[in-house]
Image (tube, rainbow, N blue to C red):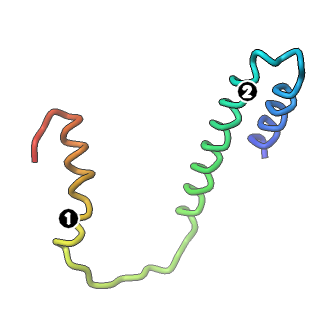
Amino acid sequence: NPMTTVRGYLQLLGERPTNAQQKPTFDLMISEMDRANEIIIQFLSLARTKPTELRCQDLNDIIKKLYPLIEADAFTQNKQI
């Protein structure tokens, strides 16, 4: 995995005494690599074919659960719901 290789090199660079001042930067880069890797893993798990599971749901319940997200999105666009 290329990301694992890059992460390993960042760890090695961060452990060198000559790079002590840059260690916080290397740590941040490692953290962001981990975050990107987690996003990729989640994306790939969504891409897997799963059997469709249909069931009846109350549309009002769905809207109530989504309302805070819709409201926040509208707020960022200077709109009201």
State the image quarter where residue 41 is shown: bottom right
The number of numbered badges drawn on the structure is 2
State the image quarter where residue 19 is shown: top right
Q: Which residue is under mark 1?
A: 63
In-image side of 55 versus 19 (left or right): left
| Residue located 89% across and 23% down the image | 16
In-image side of 45 versus 64 (left or right): right
| Residue located 12% across and 38% down the image | 79
Choose the circle earlier in sequence order: 1 or 2.
Answer: 2
Please tell me whether mark 1 sits on a helix, a strand or a loop: helix
Is 78 drawn above or below residue 49 in the view shown?
above
Q: Nearer the viewer, mark 1 or mark 2?
A: 2
Residue 8 percent across, percent down from the top left: 83, 37
**Residue occupying the far bottom of the picture:** 55
Please tell me whether mark 2 sits on a helix, a strand or a loop: helix
In-image side of 67 versus 9 (left or right): left
Name the residue type under label 1. Answer: Ile
Report the front residue among 17 and 60: 17
Name the residue type under label 2. Answer: Phe
Q: Which residue is under mark 2?
A: 26
Report the front residue among 38 and 20: 20
